[in-house]
Image (cartoon, rainbow, N blue to C red):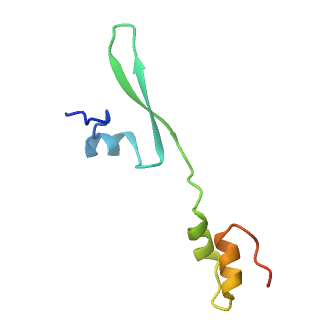
Amino acid sequence: MRVTSKGQVTIPQNVRESMGILPAETEIEFLLDENGRWYINKGKTSKKRAGRFRAAHESGKLTMSTDDIMALTRGESWPSS
């Protein structure tokens, strides 16, 4: 396995699947034991918050004005109901 110039390696797919590692959601820890061996430990899987555009898309209505849609994308509540 090669290490990139940024210090990155690719965890093989079968290892990711067996450990339940999800891209962009799972934290990984590197642990050193008393014999000098390194281990990969799966940390917490984050519950990613939807981005503001995804949230606006999911809560948007066809009857909304442009101002209402822009307010949603800015994370504001929209003025009309």
User: Is residue 35 shown left or right of residue 51?
Assistant: left
Left or right of 36 in this view: 80: right
Quadrant location, the N terminus: top left
Residue nearer the viewer, 75 or 29: 75
Number of numbered labels in the structure image:
0
Quadrant including the C terminus = bottom right
Q: Which percent across, then down, holds residue 71?
A: 70, 75
Residue occupying the point 31% across, 36% down: 8
Please identify the quarter of the rendering in which residue 19 is found: top left
Above or below — where is 76 with respect to 35? below
Give the percent coordinates (x, y) of residue 14.
Answer: 26, 44
Residue depicted at 32% across the width and 36% down the height: 6
Q: Left or right? Give the position of 33 relative to 14.
A: right
Residue occupying image coordinates x 40% and y 49%: 23
Q: Residue furthest top?
A: 35
Q: Residue at x 27, y 35 (%)?
A: 5
- Give the image location of residue 33, x and y in percent: 39, 13
Residue furthest bottom in the image? 63
Query: Whole-percent x and y of residue 48?
Result: 56, 53
